[in-house]
Image: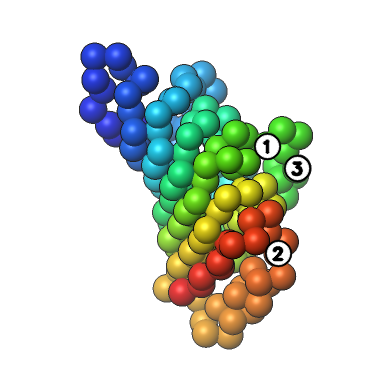
Amino acid sequence: METAYADNGVARVRTGDLHADNAAANDDVPMFHNLSSLKFYGLLWRECYAWDAVRLLLCCVPKLQTLAFESIDHPMFGSLVLTSYLEEPLDIPECLSSHLMTCHYKGFSGNEVKMELVRQILKAARVLKIIKTMAGSHLSSKAKLCIRKELMKFLRSSRACQIAFD
């Protein structure tokens, strides 16, 4: 986390940034009871680790209202898809069921792993108002249209949720 700690340590952290490599390497994450905003970023070619880290973090941030992903696809690993790491979670983290209102995904490539991550967030987030995905600049107009159509098919737990795709 790149956040200044108050005298109570992590208890008062309200916003933070987390790099995928740091999250993936650490399975001993403390509870961040007051964290309301989290940006998860990095070179996400190792989606299996990033996915595990996202799940772990969502369970440790019960009041999270804003979740952002900033993905950088490495050209050498762009086609790597590790679907075995995308099983449905048994328990829905508290933040998804009662607090998450906004989700942003910058650098969205529309690959199978990232589509599944968005699908699961939409399915579980009951008070989500908007999920905004911003496509990577390397995608063609045709590819972007296909991704947008696929995103619009996903079920949403929140009736008020809007899906925006740029």
- Which of marks 2 and 3 precedes in the sequence? 3
Residue 59's quadrant in the figure? top right
Disc number lying in front (3 or 2): 2
What separation in Å lies between label 1 and label 3 (alpha carbons)? 13 Å
Amino acid at circle 2: Phe
**Residue 109 seen from this side:** no
> Does residue 66 appear to the left or right of 144 in the view shown?
left
Residue placed most toward the observer, 97 or 48: 97
> Does residue 112 appear to the left or right of 31 in the view shown?
right
> Does residue 114 appear to the left or right of 140 in the view shown?
right
- Which of marks 2 and 1 precedes in the sequence? 1
Query: Quick one: label 2, few (<14), some, or many (20+) residues within 10 Å?
Result: some
Residue placed most toward the observer, 21 or 17: 17
Amino acid at circle 1: Ile
Is there a contact, CB below 8 Å, between mark 1 and mark 2? no
Residue placed most toward the observer, 94 or 79: 94
What separation in Å lies between label 1 and label 2 (alpha carbons)? 18 Å
Q: Position of residue 50 (x, y in %)?
A: 55, 41
Judging by the rendered image, the residue that carries numbered circle 1 is 92
Judging by the rendered image, the residue that carries numbered circle 3 is 87
Identified at 75% across, 43% down, the residue is 88
- Which element is circle 3 on? loop
Rendered image: mark on residue 154: 2
Identified at 26% across, 22% down, the residue is 5
Q: Position of residue 20 (x, y in %)?
A: 46, 40
What separation in Å lies between label 3 and label 2 (alpha carbons)? 16 Å
Identified at 50% across, 76% down, the residue is 139
Q: Position of residue 64 (x, y in %)?
A: 47, 39
